[in-house]
């Protein structure tokens, strides 16, 4: 990034004045001053005074292949020039999206499908809705409850923070939301008492069975856990834990969701954490290592079992129901709410075209272009333009040469 020398020498003050850091006591931070990381190479980061640090954090559990990978930067640069963005609605997609879906699922065993998102938190919200839709489509609409773990972490959206078992996050806004429950964590080192790791692993896994009994099997949609609990303290479960969890999920017919946002893409030595423990989940949110942190991208890996049901053709299960917010940007179905101004009706009933004399010439030109484009769109797709008029006009602004 090129920034003026004046701005660079003043970065700390600008940060304190304008930038809110996540999960941070801002008063304390602003008093102490923030550490500004300016560049990185391999496994090392350098602050703005040139001091070198070993980045044992790997960004935030995400820079799996290290910093300074020119081949990634070059590929991103080339793609940005060729096509920086296009959507997957309306029967379209892009070559990198297709090829990436093939590449990821080639390493993911039974998880043969992927729904892309822009972060791990969105991936959490997405599988949460997918699981409920899955059961609803199988004629079991009461299977809506989801069981997660105390001290687990699944992101910072409302569903993510609710599924996470962090008390301080729940306190931030009347969370968890309805239908989310927590059981214990397989933290033998701190909570194991006199039990051996094997005994403790089984005991904690059986809490899932007890919770399902309490809620009623017909009311439970899924159980979610990180193969190795990351943000909660890097909690490696005893060897007996996962086999028992898998047995319970199968016996009780509930979906098993392995949160691979941290464990995925080689972090355990296998491609995914669930492979390390030798089991096959029904759904697996991913992010972070997917791009080694070079771009914000995530997704949900979906098994055939779930994909066949949610992609059934009864019209209600279309994947677009799961679209994350990012994909509803200015050119999306909700575009008018974000950027388009509804034409005003004059007293005589005629609509204005939105152009005003005082508008800068570039804006007037853009609006004229949009209106001309809308006419062209009405000619090309009359049904579309009639039924979704504001959207058609907005889309026309994009399509008009
Ligand atoms: C296991 C797990 N799931 C989900 C998330 C949320 O991912 P993101 O920060 O990309 O929203 C995280 C983030 O640390 C995570 O560790």
Image: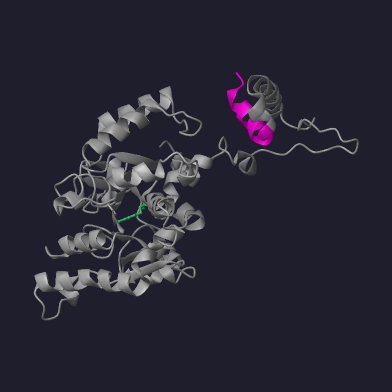
Residue 299 visible? The answer is: no
Residue 385 point in image, percent of width and height:
67, 29
Residue 66 point in image, percent of width and height:
22, 42
Q: Inspect the magenta stretch and tell me whether residue 7 lies in it.
A: no
Q: Camera-side residue: 97 or 109?
A: 109
* Farthest bottom residue in view: 194
Residue at 31% from the left image edge and 59% from the top image edge: 254
The range drawn in magenta is 387-401
Residue 290 point in image, percent of width and height:
29, 42
Q: Camera-side residue: 52 or 77?
A: 77
Residue at 46% from the left image edge and 46% from the top image edge: 322
Quadrant of the image containing the C terminus:
top right
- Position of 65 compared to 300: left or right? left
Q: Camera-side residue: 282 or 42?
A: 282
- Position of 242 compared to 18: left or right? left
Majority secondary structure of magenta residues: helix
């Amino acid at each position: 990034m090129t920034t003026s020398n004046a701005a660079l020498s003043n970065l700390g003050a600008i940060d304190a004045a304008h930038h809110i850091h996540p999960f941070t006591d801002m008063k304390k931070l602003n008093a102490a001053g923030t550490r500004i990381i300016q560049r990185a190479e391999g496994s090392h980061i350098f602050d703005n005074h040139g001091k070198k640090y070993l980045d044992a954090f790997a960004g935030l559990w995400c820079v799996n292949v290290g910093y300074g990978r020119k081949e990634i930067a070059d590929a991103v640069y080339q793609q940005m020039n060729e096509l920086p963005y296009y959507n997957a609605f309306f029967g379209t997609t892009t070559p990198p999206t297709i090829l990436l879906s093939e590449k990821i699922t080639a390493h993911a065993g039974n998880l043969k499908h992927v729904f892309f998102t822009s972060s791990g938190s969105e991936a959490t919200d997405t599988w949460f809705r997918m699981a409920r839709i899955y059961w609803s489509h199988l004629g079991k609409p009461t299977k809506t409850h989801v069981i997660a773990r105390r001290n687990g972490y699944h992101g910072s959206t409302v569903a993510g923070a609710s599924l996470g078992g962090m008390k301080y996050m729940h306190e931030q806004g009347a969370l968890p939301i309805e239908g989310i429950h927590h059981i214990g964590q397989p933290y033998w080192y701190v909570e194991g008492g006199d039990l051996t790791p094997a005994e403790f692993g089984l005991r904690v896994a059986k809490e899932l069975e007890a919770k399902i009994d309490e809620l009623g099997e017909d009311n439970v949609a899924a159980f979610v856990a990180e193969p190795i609990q990351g943000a909660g303290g890097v909690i490696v479960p005893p060897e007996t834990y996962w086999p028992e969890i898998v047995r319970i999920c199968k016996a009780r017919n509930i979906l098993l969701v392995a949160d691979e946002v941290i464990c995925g893409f080689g972090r355990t030595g296998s491609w995914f954490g669930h492979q390390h423990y030798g089991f096959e989940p029904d759904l697996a949110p991913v992010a972070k290592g997917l791009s080694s942190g070079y771009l914000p991208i995530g997704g949900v890996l979906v098994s055939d079992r779930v994909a066949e049901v949610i992609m059934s053709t009864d019209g209600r299960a279309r994947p677009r129901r799961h679209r994350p917010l990012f994909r509803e940007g200015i050119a999306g179905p909700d575009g008018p709410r974000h950027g388009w101004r509804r034409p005003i009706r004059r007293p005589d009933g005629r609509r204005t075209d939105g152009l005003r004399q005082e508008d800068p010439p570039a804006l007037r030109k853009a609006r004229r272009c949009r209106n001309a484009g809308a006419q062209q769109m009405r000619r090309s797709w009359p049904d579309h333009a009639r039924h979704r008029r504001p959207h058609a006009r907005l889309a026309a602004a994009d399509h008009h040469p």
